[in-house]
Image (cartoon, coloured by chain):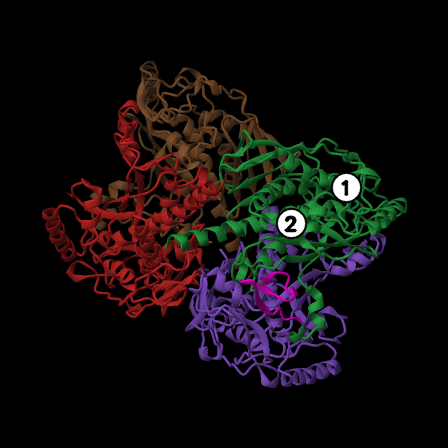
Chain colours: A green, B purple, C brown, D red
Amino acid sequence: MSNSIGERIRLTIFGESHGSVIGGILDGIPAGVELPLEYIQEKLNLRKAKGSISTSRQEEDVPTFLSGIHQGYTEGNAIAFILKNKNVQSKDYELHKPRPSHADYAAYEKYFGYMNLAGGAIFSGRLTAAFVVGGAICQKLLEDKGVYIGSHIKRLYRFQDRSFENYEKDIQKLSRLNFPVLDSSISKTMQEYLLKIKEEKDSIGGILETAVVGLPVGLGDPIFDSLESNLSKILFSIPAIKGVSFGLGFDFAQYKGSEVNDVLFYEKGKVKTKTNHNGGINGGLSNGMPLVFHTVVKPTSSIGLVQETIDLQTQTNTTVEIQGRHDPAIIHRVRPVVDAVTAFVLLDAYLKREQECLWQNSV
Amino acid sequence: MSNSIGERIRLTIFGESHGSVIGGILDGIPAGVELPLEYIQEKLNLRKAKGSISTSRQEEDVPTFLSGIHQGYTEGNAIAFILKNKNVQSKDYELHKPRPSHADYAAYEKYFGYMNLAGGAIFSGRLTAAFVVGGAICQKLLEDKGVYIGSHIKRLYRFQDRSFENYEKDIQKLSRLNFPVLDSSISKTMQEYLLKIKEEKDSIGGILETAVVGLPVGLGDPIFDSLESNLSKILFSIPAIKGVSFGLGFDFAQYKGSEVNDVLFYEKGKVKTKTNHNGGINGGLSNGMPLVFHTVVKPTSSIGLVQETIDLQTQTNTTVEIQGRHDPAIIHRVRPVVDAVTAFVLLDAYLKREQECLWQNSV
Amino acid sequence: MSNSIGERIRLTIFGESHGSVIGGILDGIPAGVELPLEYIQEKLNLRKAKGSISTSRQEEDVPTFLSGIHQGYTEGNAIAFILKNKNVQSKDYELHKPRPSHADYAAYEKYFGYMNLAGGAIFSGRLTAAFVVGGAICQKLLEDKGVYIGSHIKRLYRFQDRSFENYEKDIQKLSRLNFPVLDSSISKTMQEYLLKIKEEKDSIGGILETAVVGLPVGLGDPIFDSLESNLSKILFSIPAIKGVSFGLGFDFAQYKGSEVNDVLFYEKGKVKTKTNHNGGINGGLSNGMPLVFHTVVKPTSSIGLVQETIDLQTQTNTTVEIQGRHDPAIIHRVRPVVDAVTAFVLLDAYLKREQECLWQNSV
Amino acid sequence: MSNSIGERIRLTIFGESHGSVIGGILDGIPAGVELPLEYIQEKLNLRKAKGSISTSRQEEDVPTFLSGIHQGYTEGNAIAFILKNKNVQSKDYELHKPRPSHADYAAYEKYFGYMNLAGGAIFSGRLTAAFVVGGAICQKLLEDKGVYIGSHIKRLYRFQDRSFENYEKDIQKLSRLNFPVLDSSISKTMQEYLLKIKEEKDSIGGILETAVVGLPVGLGDPIFDSLESNLSKILFSIPAIKGVSFGLGFDFAQYKGSEVNDVLFYEKGKVKTKTNHNGGINGGLSNGMPLVFHTVVKPTSSIGLVQETIDLQTQTNTTVEIQGRHDPAIIHRVRPVVDAVTAFVLLDAYLKREQECLWQNSV
C-alpha cells in the first residue's frame, strides 16, 4: 500500500500536514543497536526551515518514540514514533482554488471532494519529517558498518557547485553544513540569490548530487529490486523530485560504449574500475565503487505571485494569490530527506546481503 | 521479492538467458477480456533483433500460455506463459573475465561464484521478452479503455528526433514503426549511423521519450505509490536504463517557479493546464494531461573491441574480446519494453482508480 | 512485515501495552463513506474489561483520528488513529521471571534481553483494541452492503451454548449482548462460574462460533488467498487463539464423503446447498451459504495462583505469583476482536470481488 | 497476490491441473547449498497416487529446473521449475454440473463462466505437487541445520493411531513410510478399510498430527507473523484442509489455566517446559519445545456415488455421477504437502531469526 515501503526493513508513514501529529513505523531494525537520539535530531534539524531563506512555518520536530527503543538501544520490534504538528494555519488556504503545479486539483478529483486538502494534507512535504526520522536510524546503522552518505546542491538555478573530489572528505564536510554546497564561495552567492527570489515572491529549483562510500559489492537484487529501482521509487516519493539518474545519467546518450564502459582492474588485490560512469551500480548491484546519483528538485510550486487557476465551486477561471508560508527553494531542506531515504534503501539491501554471506559462511 | 512487482496486478518473471525457457505470470487481470494473441505477438516482434542493425541472435518468441486464457478470453486467474530459449551459445563467453559495465563482476561476488553467468543469466536483457508479454496484455486492456502509449527515440547519440506534436497521431504513427522515430529523415540517418557503429565494433545509446494519452485524473497514490515512484521502479528494472525524468525533468533546474508552474483553466467545462511542464503528474497523481517522461538507455555494454578487464581465476589484469552476438544499440529494442512496463504500472493504477469510483457511485 | 496485513485494504498496528499510546492505520477504505464514530466506540466498548468478571485494568479507549476522516466521512486516504494507554502499572511485573504460557521467555531470547517486556509489550492483548477500531470500520462498510457478522460463546469450559438457529436473528441478538451467549439461561450460569473461577485465582477458556450472512458468491482467491487462509492468519494473530476450523472442522474426520458433501439445488432460482458442512466455503471461495467457523480461546495464561517458573537472572528454578490485573476468562472480550478481524478479511475480499464484477459489467 | 507467499523466501505457484505444465518459483534460497535432486524426488513420490488405495491418475512428476540450480548447488537466485501434466482426461468431466463440495460452483460464478474448470483448474490438488518441490528444498536446508519435520495419520475415519512418543525417532520412522502411521497394526487396518471404502465408491477423511524438532527459540514475529498465523495460512491453502490447531487445540476449552499452563524449568542449564500444551509456541514465537499441530483433512469430495446437484445450463436440479479418477482418501497424499509447507514457513522464520542473531553478534 502507498504508505509503506521496504522489504527487510519497512517504513510506514501516517498522518497529514494539518492533523495533530504525523508519524512513522520502522520495522526490521535488529535488537541491541545503540541509538543516540541526538543523531536523529541532528538530521531532523537539517530539514527544518531556518533563517530568512525558508518558510516562517516552524516546527519543533522532536520525535516521541512509542515503541522499539528502550534505554538508548533498539528493542528489536517495530520502532514507532510521532511528531507534533504545532504550527497549523489552515485559514491561509482557499481550498476551492487549486494551486498550480500542486496535487490540489488531482487530489480533489481523486477523493471526490471528501479530502480536507488544507496544507496539502497527505501530499504535503511535512510528511518527509517522518522519512528523516526513519532514515536517520538506518543511516546510523550504516555508519556503524562504515557506510557514509552525503548530498550537495550541485546546481541551484543557474549556479553550479563543484563535483565531489574526495568522496570521504567531501561527505564528512557536508555533514557539518546546513546549506550543503562544497564550494563555499558559490554557497554564499546561492544564498544571496535565494533572498532576492524570496523578495520576488518567486522560487527556484536545482540538482542534488548524492554519493555513498563504503558499500560492499553485491547489494541489490536482479530484476525488480535493482538498487536503481528501489532508490528511484522512494526518491520519487519526495514531493518536488522530477528526475533521478545514476552515474553519467542522461549524458550517457552523448557517448560511445568504448568511451563510457568502466573497465575493471586489480589494485593491490582489490577490484576497482578505472572510471565510475555507472555510478557504482552494474546490473542493479553495487560494484564496490562509490554510489553516485542525481535528483532534480523542481522550483517550489507555492509562490507568492498572483497566478491563474480555476475555481472548483463556480467552475470558472480565476486567479489565486497563495497566502501561506513558503520557501523560495526547498532543495537544501530536501537534502536530509534524500540522504534518509537513501540510507533506508541501502540498509534494506545491506541486511539482505549480510544474510547471503551468513549462510555462505556456514556452508 | 525481486522477481515480482505490482499490487492490483502482479507480474512475476522467471528463468535465465541460457536456460531452456523463460516465463512470466500476470495475476489480477479480470475475467472475460478478449485477448487477441496477435496483439501480444506484434509487441514481441518489435523487441526482436532485426536486420543488420541488431544482434544475430534470433529467438522465435512465440509464447505458450499455461493458464488464464481460454478460447481467446481471459479466465480471471493468473496468466502464466513461457518462451523458449532456442538460440543458446554458451561457449561464446569467457566467464572468468567479467565484461566491463556488465553485471558479471558484481554477480560473481554476490553469488560467491555459484551462479552460471553464461549469457548474463538472470541479468540478461533476454528476460525483458517476458516483460513485453505481460505488459502487452495490460496495454490491450488500457486501449480498450481509450488509453494509448507510445515511445520514440528522442535522441540517438548526437542525432535528435522532433518532439511529440500531436500526441494521439504521433502515438498512432509510432505503433506502426519498427524503428520508432517521428522525423523520418532523421530516422534514416540514425540507422545508417548504427551500421557504421556496428562496423566499428562499438555501441551508442540514447533517450526515449514516452507519452500516454487518455488517462483519467487521479491515478496513482500518495507517498510511496506515486505514479513517478512506480513507473521509475520498473523502468530501472530494464537493463541499460540509467535515468528517468518526468515532464521537464532535469531542465526544471533552469527555471523559476513562475516560469514553469502549470496554471489550470477550464476549456469547454474540462480542466486543463496551459503548459505541461510536470508531464501530467502532480503530487504523484495523474492530472488529466498527457503523461510524458524520458528514459536514458546507455550504450550497449557488450562491444566487440578489445577491452581491459580482470581475470577472476588468476586474479590478474588482462583483456577481453567479447565474442558473443551484440547490438550496436538496443534503444529501439528497449522501446516496446518501456511501453510494456508503462502499461503494467498504469493498468495497476487504473484498476485501483476504477474501484475508488465504483464505491463512490454506490454510496 | 509482522505489523501489517491485507491486500486491498491494509491494517498496520503500532505501539506497546505499556507505552503512551497504541494505534493503527487502515489504508484502502474508499472516500465518501459515512462513518459514525459511535459505531466504532460501541465495538470498542464490547472489548473493554467490565464488571466483576474482568480485570480491573480500565482503559477509556476513545480513539483519536489523525487522518482519513473529515466531518464524519472517509476522505479516501489512510485512516490513522491512536488510543491512549492510561492505566499502566509496570511495577506489577517481575520481568526476570517469565510467566508460564506467556510470550515472556521466547521474547526474552528473541530480543536478547533488549525488549522491555512490561505488560507483555507488543505481545499484549492490549493491541487488539487497535484491531477493533480498524475492523469496526470494515464491519460498518460490510453492513452497508448487507453483510452481517456475529460470534457467540459456543462453549465456556464445560458449559455449552446452543448453536445458531436463525442466523440473521441470532446475529442481530448478539450485537446487543455484552456477554454473547444465545441461550440466556446458560449465559447466567457461565457468568456465575466465572466469578467462582476468579475467586479461585484460576482461569478458563472456550470456543467461539462465528457466522456471517449476506456474503456474495466468489469471495476469496485460489491457492494462498483462500478465505480460510486469510481468516486463519489474522485469527491466529489474536493472543490466546490456538485453533481455527471451518464448517464441521475436526468433526469431518468422523464421516464419509457421502454423509458430508453439501449437495447443490435451486430454490426459487437461487443456488443453495442442502447442508452447510463446509461452512460456506468451497475451494477457498464463498459459496453463498452462511460462513461459519470456530475458534478456540485458551484459558487466560495469567492466573493469580503461585506457579513454578525460572529466574532468568539467577538461572535457577523458582516460583512466580503474578500480581497484575487479570481476567478469569477473556473469551467474551475476544469476541469483538474476532468479529473485527473477520470484517477486515471479508471487506478485503469484497473489494476484490467488486472489481471483478465491475470489469465484467463494462466488457 | 494469491499465487505467492512468504517473506524472506517466496514461493510462487503457476499453472492448472489440465494445462501442459504446472510449476513454481522459490526465491530467497541462499547460494551454495548442496541440493540432491533425489531428496526432492523422494518427497514428490510420497505424494504420488500409489497402489489400489489411490486414484489411477498417474503423473511421473519429475521436475525440470529452469534456473537457480547449477551442478547440484543453488545459485542464489530464484529457483524456477516445471512439472509436466501428462495424464489429462478432460472428457471425464461434465462441467455444467458442479460437483458437490468442490470449488466448481463458486468458481463458475467468480469467473463468470470464463474459466475452463476441467480437472478443477487452479483449484485442483494437482498444484500441491509444486508445493512439495518448493517445500522439499526448504526441508533440506532445515535438516542441514538439525530441524526435522514429520506427520502421521493420527486418525482416519474412526481409526486412531498412537501419538508421538519419542519425537526424534518417530519422525525418522515416518520418513520411511509411504502410509504414515506410527502403530503398524492400525496401519494395516486403515489400508484395508480404504479398499472397502473405494469399493463403496465413497471416501473418508482424517486428522494429521505434525511435529517439528530442533527449532531454536524465537522463530516467528509479533502480531501478524506469528508462527501460528503463517503456518495456518499456508496449511489452509491445501485443498480439503478445514481445521488447524496447535498444541491442545480445541481441547483447551476443557481445562482450567492452572491445568494447562506450561511451567518453565531449567534442566542442565537448558530452559524447558514440563508440559507442551501450547505445542511449542508462545506469543506466536517458538519456545524451544517440539512444535506440534493438527490438521483435519475432509473426506475426498469426489465420490463415485450418484449425488444430487444442479445443471448450470438448464438451471434445474439434477444428479451427477462423477466419472473421473478419485481417491477413497487423500490424507496420506496430503502428508508430504503438509510437511513441505511447514518447512517453507519455518525456513522463512529461520532465516529471519538468523539475521537477528547475526547483527547481535556483531554489535
- Residue type at mark 1 is Leu
What residue is at 62 percent from the left and 53 percent from the top? Answer: A213
- Observer-nearest residue: D213 or C258? D213
Residue situated furthest top in the rendering = C199
Q: Which residue is mark 1?
A: A95
Magenta stretch: includes residue A271: yes
- Residue type at mark 2 is Ile
- Observer-nearest residue: D13 or D138? D138
The disc label shown at residue A149, or none:
2
x, y percent for residue C245: 32, 40
Residue situated furthest front in the rendering = A268
> N-terminal of the two: label 1 or label 2?
1
x, y percent for residue A84: 67, 32
Q: Is residue A35 left or right of residue D308?
A: right
Disc 2 chain ID: A
Tag 1's secondary structure?
loop
x, y percent for residue C23: 55, 33
Q: Is residue A47 above or below residue D47?
A: above
- Observer-nearest residue: A349 or C248? A349
Give the CA distance from mark 1 to mark 2: 39 Å
Magenta span of residues: A260-281
Magenta stretch: includes residue C36: no
